[in-house]
Image: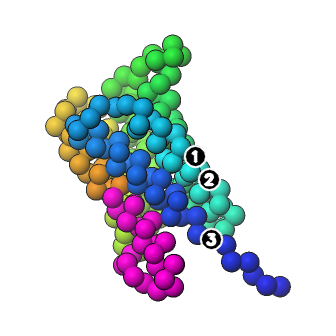
Amino acid sequence: MEKTIKANPAPIGLIGFGMTTILLNIHNAGFFPLDVVIMAMGITIGGFAQIIAGILEYKNNKTFGTVAFVAYGFFWLSLVLIWTLPKMGLGEPASPLSLGLYLLLWGIFSLGMFIGTFRSVLVSKLVFGTLVILFMLLALANFTGSHLIHTIAGYEGILCGSLAMYEAIAQVVNEAHGKKILPL
């Protein structure tokens, strides 16, 4: 029986994660307020595109990619709901403690995923390593109320998202050329 070659869905998940992470963290670094652009990215490319990529990773028997893209896709959807539900009269705004715990839990999850990258390419380790740091900084900023830590987290998040975008682009370029053009 001839094996069907399937496309790699990871680049769309990585680009969704990367672009949305960069955009939110440009806000976190203090360059512009939280607005509809970030929320729209969180719902579409950060949320739905990553979930679709995760489902396709499942069809390719890739547990890590399935868990990562589906979980982080729903992270983005939940974050947008945290921001918008109170504005629609559907709950109280998140307290710094509850948001800090939310971010801490995502940091712990990300640490587990980071451990899952130890046998992967260097850029994957860097993406997940910086993601752990990002979530921990954001949790700490919420727990302490520190604007400085929040700003530092923003710059660190720009780095994290940029690494994810690089990994996505490198995978596409390398596959398109049938050889290693961009190192991973």
Q: Amino acid at mark 3?
A: Ala
Task: Identify the secondary structure beneath mark 3.
Answer: loop
Examine the rendered structure and indicate whether residue 15 appears above or below residue 182: above
Residue pictured at 43% horizontal, 44% vertical: 106
Badge 2 crowding class, 10 Å Cα cut-off, few under 14, some 14 to 19, many 20 or more, is some
> In the image, residue 40 lies at what x, y percent?
48, 37
In-image side of 5 versus 50 (left or right): right
Where is the N terminus found, in terms of image quarters? Answer: bottom right
How far, Cα to Cα, is label 3 from label 1?
18 Å
Extreme top residue here? 89
Extreme left residue here? 148
> In the image, residue 54 lies at what x, y percent?
60, 56
Closest to the observer, 113 or 29: 29
Residue pictured at 33% horizontal, 26% vertical: 96
Residue pictured at 45% horizontal, 65% vertical: 168
The reply to whether the C-beta atoms of the residues labelled 1 and 2 are less than 8 Å apart is yes
**How is colour applied across the structure in the image?**
rainbow
Q: Amino acid at mark 2?
A: Ile
Q: Amino acid at mark 1?
A: Phe
How far, Cα to Cα, is label 3 from label 2?
13 Å
User: Where are the magenta residues, as a range?
Assistant: 162-184
Residue bearing mark 2: 52
Where is the C terminus found, in terms of image quarters? Answer: bottom left
How far, Cα to Cα, is label 1 from label 2?
6 Å
In the rendered image, which quarter is residue 39 located in? top left
Disc ID at residue 48: 1
- The question of residue 172 being in magenta is answered with yes
**Residue 150 in view in this figure:** no
Residue bearing mark 3: 7
Of the two numbered discs 3 and 1 on the same chain, state the one appearing first in sequence.
Answer: 3
Closest to the observer, 89 or 128: 89
> In the image, residue 163 lies at what x, y percent?
34, 62
